[in-house]
Amino acid sequence: MIPYGRQHISDDDIEAVVAVLRSDFLTQGPAVPQFEAAFAAGCGARHAVATCNATAALHLACLALGLGPGDRLWTSPNTFVASANCARYCGAEVDFVDIDPHTYNLSVPVLAAKLADARRDGRLPKIVVPVHFAGQPCDMAGIRALADEYGFAIIEDASHAVGARYRGKPVGGCDCSDITVFSFHPVKIITTGEGGMATTNDPRLAERMALLRSHGITRDPAQMEGAPDGAWSYEQIALGFNYRMTDLQAALGLSQLRRLDDYVARRTQLAQRYDAALRPLPVTCPRQAPDSASSWHLYVLRVGEAPGSPARATLFAALRAQGIGVNVHYIPVHTQPDYRRLGFRRGDFPEAERYYAHAISLPLFPTMSDADQEMVIAAVRAAIAGAASPSAPC
Ligand SMILES: *Cc1c(COP(=O)(O)O)cnc(C)c1O
């Protein structure tokens, strides 16, 4: 079986984790701050806060920006549910902004129109969460201009975009946003098993996220409300969580980070090979904005739209039957039962729904061999030939 995504673990990674196992600290030791410092330096951010997963980082980012009951957060419907759920953890409302039909990212013109309506109705969002779908950065300059006009904060959900670049700079530098969040789940670009990171240039946001990551407890006398009883003293000064990353995970992340450029280079090469092989066929290859470089977390084809193109379900079944682990990203969040209960309906975000009806993610991961990729391409070609032949059942 060729999976759609797979981690790569080197001997160096294993040694790095074993070294932590043999050390004094499995958690709350030196590896987490080392990983944070290396990650922040790599993307050009002043601060990085490591967490147990990206979902926790999104929650902390919302809390640090003061999201609460009565507030609104807007995100893309074409994302993993966590991008929206973070608002609900804070008691805030979620709404969605339909996607661009070519990049599948949140559409800036749609956002602009929705903001104008929201201002008229007094329902402006406090936070907008652009998601860098498949690793391709959103139009951040466009979103920043709207944030300046309407006064919302921006959290970039860069779970797919570790190692991606926007206008020549690494994603995570927060040039256009308040906070950027990354995921290190094994299918993502680099992994810590489970893990996440939030970067920011604002020291107050970094401090708040670090505080809430660990129960809202401080040992810093300067932050305490009372006089310390002694050297053992700590104070809980806010209601926080245990959202910490372990040192085992951070050591793995630090080791993986050294291969980030190689990973993104190989993913890019595989994506270009898919483009070259599949572009002549009646399918739509992913379109890239000229001012950004994707980290290529996903390679998504759109099928079943042009004449002679197989329906997505047909292609999905044909490839799975041959041991090719295709997948679908994403079922629009607003169509999930738990969101329909909030009042969302099918038809609310038609571009995301149309995209979803035709999308299929092909296998893509840095250790995928050229031969495996040839097999995937041959299987796609055969399915398309089958769909185009007059003897094929409709
Ligand atoms: C994977 C993912 C998340 C959640 O990441 P975890 O680390 O699994 O919590 C959030 N948003 C997007 C877009 C993702 O792909």
Image (tube, helix red, strand yellow):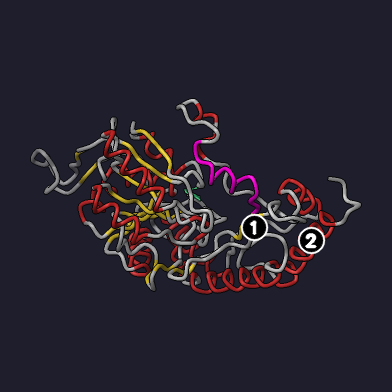
Q: Is residue 79 left or right of residue 178?
A: right
Q: Amino acid at mark 1?
A: Leu
**SS of the residue under disc 2:** helix
Q: Which residue is mark 1?
A: 301
* 85 drawn magenta: no
Image quarter of the N terminus: bottom right
Residue 368 percent coordinates (x, y): 67, 67
Q: Is residue 348 visible?
A: yes
- Which is nearer the N-term, disc 1 or disc 2? 1
Is disc 2 surrounded by few (<14), some (14 to 19) or many (20+) residues within 10 Å?
A: some
User: Which region of the structure is painted magenta?
Assistant: 348-360
* 349 drawn magenta: yes
Q: Is residue 26 visible?
A: no
Q: Which residue is mark 2?
A: 379
Q: Is residue 326 left or right of residue 240?
A: right
Q: Nearer the viewer, residue 121 or 232?
A: 121
Say whether mark 1 is within 8 Å of ligand 1.
Answer: no
Image quarter of the C terminus: top right
Residue lying at 79% horizontally and 65% vertically, measured from the top left: 378
Q: Amino acid at mark 2?
A: Ala
